Every structure is written in structure tokens, then in C-alpha cells.
Amino acid sequence: MGEVHEGNTIMDWMEQEQERGITITSAATTCFWKDHRINIIDTPGHVDFTIEVERSLRVLDGAIVVFDGVSGVEAQSETVWRQANKYHIPRICFINKMDRIGADFAKSVSSISHKLKITPVCLQLPIGSEENFKGVIDLVEEKAFIWDQDKLGEKYSTVPIPEEYKRPARKGREKMIEQIAELDDEIMQKYLAEESISTDEIKKVLRQATLNLKMTLVFCGSAFKNKGVQQIISAVLDYLPGPLDLPPIEGQGQGKKQGKKMLCPTDFEHPVCGFAFKLMEDTFAGHLTYIRVYSGCLKPGVPLLNTREAKKERIQKLLKIHSKSREEVPFLKAGDIGAVLGLKWTKTGDTLCTTAYPVSLESISFPEPVISMVIEPKSSVDQKKMMKVLQTIQREDPSCFISSDPETGQALLMGMGELHLEVLIHRLVKDHKVQVNTGPPKVSYRETILTSAEGKGIFDKKIGEQKQFAHVLLKIEPDKNLKALIFDNQVQETLPTEFISAIKEVIEGSSYAGLLMGYRLLGIKVCLLKAEYQGENEEGIKAALKTAAVQAFRKALTNSKSWLLEPIFNLEVLTPDEFLGDVMSDLNTRRAKVEEVFLENHLQVIKAQVPLAPLFGYATELRSLSQGRASFSMEMREYAPVPEKISKQVLV
């Protein structure tokens, strides 16, 4: 057992994780409990590293969501909860830090109900709280667990429920049975008839309700002292799904089976299907690809098809991962999570399968970077090395992006927040020994249009002996949703699909650079009104149409009115009451829209929407305003138009 505060946990193995006392990258391991093997992925909680949560949830069957016993549900917890909803992940809740000053189990449960809009079902009650927290009551089995204070949670005693806790335990059990009776007729009949209900009956209904996402079970403890850890691991076996409990994962057929729905069941004899969810460069092992095997049995030397690249990959070695240590294994079976050595083409979100059963599973959507920083090598010797390392980091972390400033040509490192950029630079300097200079962080704006406009493009040239002609007319319109570009083909004449695809592809590519500052365009609908062409060579016609389409798109943008968009964040500040006025005044100077202020756990909670730009350096300023006693969390909300006064300042 390790402790995050002392920097000696098994899962937080990176130097920066140990220095900062937080999880930065997801880490995989395996543990054995009651004759079962459990694959565990530990993910970060900080919103800057949301990609680690996203790709882990994509391949996991269940989740333990950890909440703070003092703060309850925090803003970043809500983000993770929504990600779990997206992938329909059965989950159980663990209310942590029950031994901290201010810990309140009932308030934490209430915040789960209020903020996550669910009905929590408590299977445990704490015995004591804060410095008096010494154990938990199991409401299902009607017994108590008391921990040995000297053994850091390794030793505990199973005892009858203490006399002073019998009444709240009886009330808690009755409420739990009332909640499950609503989902099961047999339990309901026994409950109404006041007959005894066995532990096995209760567990069966709770498990099925959890798998069907109809219930969310709540446990409690203290990870700092390892209290409640054994019980939550047992709960994983009792209530969360194993690979065989879930239906076969669906995918889309490829090749001759293009577009057909194909199933990948958890079956060792089925053709192999695996999903690559994380890439990592290891100093000793080399290029590692983390993979979840959904079907079949993966073995070294067997060629597999990467369906995105339509290329074959050959596996050199298979590894079981235990945080930073590796163990070579002869195979990975359906349900396993491990790593593959030797893949050339595979990226995060790719499917690997046999050529006999070509299937593509749904990929992972990556968040858009919202902040950028100019980065350059300290010497010309480091130039090539820097770009090579940055490309490696981008492969590992798809939420960061490398581009160049359209005006200066300098390299831009883009990420999800100031902490994210700090970590990336630290890796560059400390881990890869590349000395760099960096500029101050800048907001990654977006651009949109306010008015509709038309544009036409004409390509008329003789290439070799052949004349190539193309005429494209299109119209652009603002889209209030401010999402990625929408393409609408309104050409009346029959136009070959491949030509429409070529025009759509080149316009989508052009949308990554607006006219104002070269930022990506959002909130635009492009209507293709006319597309005429002459020529005999298909590739030549495509090239002519693409050129004409780009001309038409840029002219339409010129004829329209462009506008800047800025990222808006949800901000949640927790501050003692005496600093509330100063904190609110400071937020007003940062263009914040305060939504609500309320008292919770002796702290004032401020919820606001704030543009990203004024939040640079906010952590330092908040510490100064509150004598280090206030804290905040934030998450990306949306892009919104920049006020005209601010826009003029940005565009200078």
C-alpha cells in the first residue's frame, strides 16, 4: 500500500505525480481478490487531463467514482460523471476522506443526489467521523468493520453493530430495502409482509439494478488510512460487471462487410478484436500500445488488421502492466487489458482485428485544446529533437496539439489548461532533456461568421494535354450551435459521390484557418449550390473541384462578417465567508457571470461562467486574496462570441 501524500503510491509513478501529489496520467494494474482478477485503471481527476478519463472509460466495464467526504460532489466530479453516462458505465460511489475535519457523510450523499440528479443507495454508514472515524456499518450483512489504528487499514475486525449505532443502522437498512423493493416484486411482497430478506436476495437485486444503471450504490472510508478499501474491492465483485455480464460490443464491418453491424462477444474462441486506447513511449520497452481485448485470444506473431489504416500489424510481445513495471505474457484473452509491443501504424482509438472478421469499433472523441504557448529550442541543435519529442508527446496525448503561428511561424504547443502545458513542458525538459524557451500561455480562440454570404471559385487550366475546368458556387450561413462546420449538398444535378466527398473534405480542411487570426471556424453551415466540371481524368477533376471549392469558400468568408469566439469555463470557488466580498469583486474584474452563491460545509460556494483569458494566474491571485484558504475548480463549458471591446484588443 502506498500513500499519495508521501509520493510512494504504486499507481502515481511519474516524477511529477509524486512532486505535485496528483494523478496526471492513467495507470493500469491488476489485483487478485477472492479468486478473481480485477483489471484496474487509475485516472486523474483534474479537468486538464480529461482525455485520460475519456479513453479509460471507453474500455472499462465499471467504475468506482471517488468523492471528497468534506466537499462532496465537485465541479470536476460532475464532468467525470457525465463522461461515465456517455459510455453507459455501471458505477459505485466511494465517499473518501471520512477522517478529515469537516467530513459529513449525509451531506456528501445529499450532494450526490442534488448535483448528479440520481438517487443514491447507501450500503454503508460510517462509525464516527473526522478524527473519530474508526469503521463502517454494512447495511446489507448487518455487521460492522472496525480497523486497527496501528496497521494503516491492513487489519480490521468484523463485529456486531455497536449499540449506539443500531437505530441509525436499522433506519438505513429499511430505507435501502424500500429502494430496492421498488425494482423487484418478490422483495416488495416480503417487505410488505414483514418477512426476512436474505443477504443473497438483496445482493442479487442490487447487482442487477447497478448493471442496468437503475441504482448507484454508496460506500465510504478513508483511502489515506486504507479504511474501507477491502470492502470497496469486494463490492466490485458483488455489484460491478465482469466481461461476461455485458452484451457483445457492436462495431461496423469493413471491406466486403462495409457498413454491416458486427458483434464482438467476450468469447476466447471468437476471431480476435481489440481496441487501442493509449500509446506510450517507454525508455526500455520502446513503443507501447495499451489495448483492451474484446474477443478472441491475442498472441505474439499473429498479424492483425488496423481497420482505420487498412494495414497489417504484427505483434512482437504482449505485456501485462502493473503501473510502471511490465510482465511479458504468452497471450491476452477477451476481457483482458494489457500492452502490445511493436505496432507501427496504430493510434489511440484504433481497432485491431483479424482479416477474417474485419470490424471497426467506435473511436474516441478528443477534446479541443483551449490554450496555447509559443515554444522554441534554446539552440539550433535542439530544433529537430524538440519537434520529434513533441510529435511523440502528441501521439501519447491526443488532447495536446502541435501547430505553427501563421504570422511568425513559431511552434505552438496547445493544451487543455495552464497545468496541462506546465506538465508537457516539464516532460520535454526533464524526461527528454530538450532545453526550450516558452512564451506566456495564450487563449486558443475560434472564429465564426455573423452574416450569410456567397462565394464562387473557378479553375480553368490546361494540364498537360488535357483541359481541366471546375466552377463551384456555395453559400455560408451562421449556425447558432457554434459546433464544427456543417456541409449541405444542395446541387440539383446528379453529382458523383466521390466528387461531393472531395469538395466536402477540402472545405472542412479550410475551416481550420479563419480570416481574422487563423483560428478554427465554428458555427458555419456551408451549402453547395453549384458544381460544374469538365475533364476526362477523375483525379484531375477532383483536383480542379477542390481548388475551385477553396476559392469559393474563402471568397464567401471575405463577403461575410467574421467574429472571434472565446472559451467559456464553468468556475466553482470555495472560500471562507470572510473572503467572499474580495473574491466576488475580483471575479467581476474577470468578466465573470455569477450564477449562484450558497453556503455548504461552512464554506461559501460561488458558481460562475468566466472566459478563459482573465483566469490566467487565478490560482495565485485567489491564494493571495484568501490567505491560501480558498480553492477553485473549472471545466470547459462552450465557445461564445468575444465582446466587441475585448475583440479589438485581441485583434491588435
Image (cartoon, helix red, strand yellow):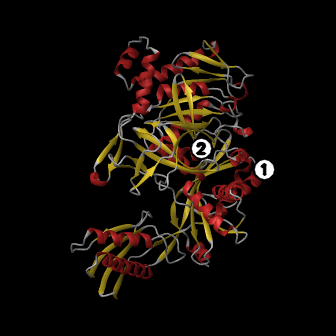
- Residue marked by disc 2: 74
Where disc 1 sits, the SS reads loop
Work out whether 209 lies above or below 562.
Answer: above
- In the rendered image, is residue 397 in sight? no
Where disc 2 sits, the SS reads loop
Q: Nearer the viewer, residue 595 or 297?
A: 297
State which quarter of the image contains the N terminus.
top right
Q: Amino acid at mark 1?
A: Gln
- In the rendered image, is residue 305 in sight? yes
Q: Quadrant of residue 298?
A: top left
Pointer 1 local density, CA inside 10 Å: few below 14, some 14–19, many at least 20: few
Question: Given this view, does label 1 or label 2 mark the residue nearer the observer?
Answer: 2
Work out whether 119 lies above or below 261.
Answer: above
Residue 388: x, y in percent? 61, 63
Q: Amino acid at mark 2?
A: Glu
Q: Residue at coordinates 47% horizontally, 37% vertically from top-left?
A: 332
- Residue marked by disc 1: 627
* Position of residue 583 in the picture relative to residue 344 (left or right): right
